[in-house]
Structures are given as C-alpha cells and as structure tokens.
C-alpha cells in the first residue's frame, strides 16, 4: 500500500509518500510546497493543487491521509487552511482516492505516544522510525507523521477486525 501523507498549511504544505508491504514501512519521497507569498491566494491554491496532483500522478498512492483543521490563531488562517485542504481533497477525488483525516493529537499520540508532543519531538521520532537519512523540514516531518498515523490506525483496525 502506498499512502500520501499531507500536512496542509496556508503558507507551507508538507507531503510525503510512504509504502507499506509485508517487510514494513518505507519512506519513499517527501517535500514541502511553498507558493510565493506575493501572488494572490487563489494562485497559491492552484500551485498547491498542481503540486499535489503531480505527486499523485507520479507515485500513484492508494490512499491519502491529511491532518484535520486545527483552530488557528485567527479565523482567517483557519479558513485559509480549509481552502488548502479542499484543493488537496479535490486532487485526491479526481483519482478516486479515499481521504482519511486525523487530528493533531491523534497523530502525535500515534507517532510519539503523547498527544501533546512538541513539533521537535514529532520530527525526531519520524526521522528515527523511518530512517530518512536526513533532517526533514518541520512541515515534511508533520506530513510523514500523518502518513504513519494512518498506517498505524489501519493496522489497528485490521487487528480488531480479525478478533471478531
């Protein structure tokens, strides 16, 4: 299974591709999308949409995992993040991909074992778990955490289903 993990942001969107097979989980690719700040917001959304669409076409993920909307510092930021999530969901829907949403505390709990872990703790853990071999940007690390959370939750659901 190939999962696209996404940490949507109004200014920077982190993303990663993780593959899981019988031998485990493997980090394949990741990065961040940082549209120019000096262009209108709709053009910035288009940049994010095109980049995510390109990643989907190139890596052909089976599912998309995305961080849910958090209450940002102000309403404008929250609405901006919602728009970014919308273009990501649109890119996924065009390829009939299921989109799974996780709260920040679910993601942190899954990766660090503490739902209120710091960004630095999340970054440290995902780099160690996935053996990326390099320091990830905070946004890319968060996206990797989203993808890992999805795979962990999916494994737990399979375990629970096998018990019934």
Image: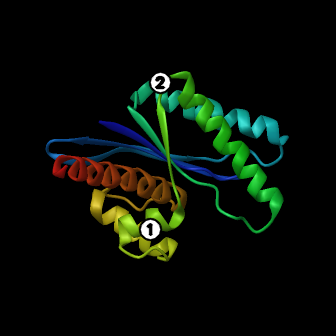
Number of numbered discs overlaid on the protein picture: 2
Q: Eyeballing the image, is 85 above or below 96?
A: below
Which numbered disc, 1 or 2, marks the residue closer to the eye? 1
- Give whichever of 159, 95 is nearer the camera: 159
Q: Under tag 1, what secondary structure?
A: helix
Q: Which residue is pictured at 49% across the width and 32% down the height?
A: 55
Tell me if I can see residue 156 in this picture: yes
User: What is the C-alpha distance between the residues marked 1 and 2?
Assistant: 29 Å
According to the picture, the residue beneath numbered tag 1 turns out to be 108
Q: Which residue is pictured at 47% across the width and 76% down the height?
A: 117
Tell me the crowding category of disc 1: few under 14, some 14 to 19, or many 20 or more residues within 10 angstroms, Cα based. many
Q: Eyeballing the image, is 121 above or below 146?
A: below
Tell me the number on the disc at residue 95: none
How are the colours assigned in the image? rainbow
Taking the image as shown, residue 163 lies to the left or right of residue 40, namely left
Taking the image as shown, residue 77 lies to the left or right of residue 26, namely right
Q: State the image coordinates of residue 13 (x, y, percent, origin top left).
A: 60, 49
Q: State the image coordinates of residue 70 (x, y, percent, origin top left).
A: 64, 61
Q: Quadrant of residue 89?
A: top right
According to the picture, the residue beneath numbered tag 2 turns out to be 57
């Amino acid at each position: 299974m190939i999962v696209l993990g996404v940490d949507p942001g109004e200014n920077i969107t982190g993303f990663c591709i993780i593959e899981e097979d019988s031998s485990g989980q493997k980090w394949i690719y990741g990065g961040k999308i940082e549209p120019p700040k000096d262009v209108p917001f709709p053009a910035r959304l288009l940049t994010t949409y095109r980049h995510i669409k390109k990643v989907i076409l190139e890596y052909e993920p089976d599912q998309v995992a995305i961080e849910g909307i958090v209450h940002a510092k102000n309403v404008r930021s929250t609405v901006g993040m919602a728009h970014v999530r919308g273009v990501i969901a649109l890119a996924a829907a065009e390829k009939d991909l299921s989109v799974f949403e996780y709260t920040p505390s679910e993601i942190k709990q899954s990766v660090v074992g503490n739902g209120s872990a710091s960004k630095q703790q999340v970054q440290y853990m995902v780099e160690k778990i996935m053996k990326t071999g390099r320091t990830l940007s905070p946004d890319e690390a968060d996206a990797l955490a989203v993808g890992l959370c999805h795979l962990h939750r999916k494994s737990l659901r399979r375990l629970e289903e096998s018990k019934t």
